[in-house]
Image (tube, rainbow, N blue to C red):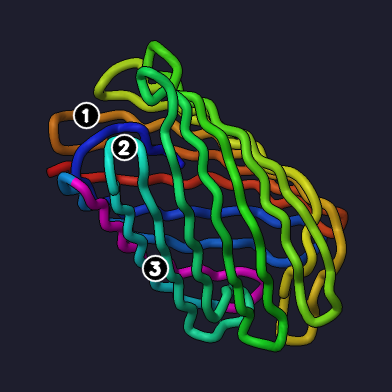
């Protein structure tokens, strides 16, 4: 989430998170590559996660295409290795349009499909509105309406994001998410269902030179069963 600085870049991040109520601490790392061109932006990511006493790996790829200076689409796919703590398959798609004389308003709408390694899966509709304010500030609010099956469990989540880029070298961001969740797989024998949760993330990215940047992010997530807090540290290389 610590983005906001333009250019082609790659990064490596490591994170550690403590979890209450004997659910087991989280740790892991991920690497990401972002390659923008004139009309396209390509994203690639690999995640290694240890959580709830299990380990898993996930690969992801996303493509954004700008059809014009106002219309764009985003398509992404993530594949897990079958570990219960990660989706076996996740696909997301969005269509966005930028409005206003300075294209300062951005509307996005899309859908999502998430399949667990077991019989559980989600189908969701998503939407958001963002304002690209003066002084390098971006504000976004949005939501997700989700149907989990089997069981036809309905849930929804709302989010708010603020990204401030006070200089070409520095980016500050905050994200808050809250609402209900249909399910969360803890182990192959344990699944949490029908609960509310909230999460907060604060991030800072600083360019040390024209090519290198450091980032730090703090996270806090709460639900009725446990609280998870942690820090992510990253090193990025700009091209």
Instruction: Tell me the CA gap for discs 3 and 1.
Output: 28 Å
Q: Secondary structure at mark 2?
A: strand
Badge nearest the viewer, 2 or 3: 3
Magenta segment, prevailing SS (helix, strand or loop): strand
For this orientation, the residue located farthest to the top is 135
Measuring 37% from the left and 38% from the top, which residue is drawn there?
3
Residue 225 position within the rendered picture, expressed as x and y whole percent measured from the top left: 85, 59
Q: Would you place residue 184 above or below residue 239 in this image?
A: below
Q: According to the image, label 2 marks what residue?
A: 214
Instruction: Tell me the CA gap for discs 2 and 3.
Output: 23 Å
Measuring 68% from the left and 77% from the top, which residue is drawn there?
121
As for residue 157 lying within the magenta part, the answer is no
Frontmost residue, 108 versus 173? 108
Disc 2 + disc 1, Cβ < 8 Å: yes
Res 14 label: none
Tell me the crowding category of disc 2: few under 14, some 14 to 19, or many 20 or more residues within 10 angstroms, Cα based.
some
Measuring 76% from the left and 71% from the top, which residue is drawn there?
148
Residue 217 position within the rendered picture, expressed as x and y whole percent measured from the top left: 49, 39
Q: According to the image, label 3 marks what residue?
A: 60
Res 208 label: 1
Give residue 211's quadrant in the image.
top left
Is 68 on the left-hand or right-hand side of 145? left
Residues rendered magenta in the picture: 39-54
Q: Secondary structure at mark 1?
A: loop
Tell me the quarter of the image containing the C terminus.
top left
């Amino acid at each position: 989430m610590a983005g906001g600085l333009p250019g082609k870049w790659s990064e490596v991040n490591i994170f550690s998170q403590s979890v209450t109520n004997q659910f087991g601490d989280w740790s892991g790392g991920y690497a990401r590559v972002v390659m923008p061109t004139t009309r396209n932006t390509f994203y690639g990511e690999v995640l290694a996660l240890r959580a709830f006493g299990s380990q898993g790996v996930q690969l992801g790829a996303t493509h954004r295409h700008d059809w014009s200076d106002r219309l764009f689409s985003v398509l992404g796919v993530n594949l897990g290795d079958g570990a219960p703590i990660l989706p076996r398959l996740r696909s997301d798609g969005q269509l966005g349009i930028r409005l206003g004389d300075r294209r300062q308003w951005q509307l996005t709408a899309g859908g999502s499909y998430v399949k667990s390694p077991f019989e559980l899966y989600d189908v969701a509709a998503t939407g958001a509105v963002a304002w690209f304010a003066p002084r390098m500030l971006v504000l976004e609010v949005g939501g997700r309406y989700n149907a989990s099956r089997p069981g036809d469990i309905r849930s929804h989540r709302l989010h708010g994001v603020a990204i401030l880029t006070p200089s070409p070298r520095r980016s500050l961001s905050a994200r808050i998410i809250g609402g209900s969740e249909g399910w969360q797989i803890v182990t192959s024998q344990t699944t949490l269902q029908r609960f509310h949760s909230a999460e907060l993330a604060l991030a800072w990215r600083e360019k040390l030179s024209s090519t290198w940047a450091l980032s730090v992010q703090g996270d806090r997530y709460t639900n009725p069963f446990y609280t998870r807090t942690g820090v992510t540290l990253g090193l990025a290389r700009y091209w």
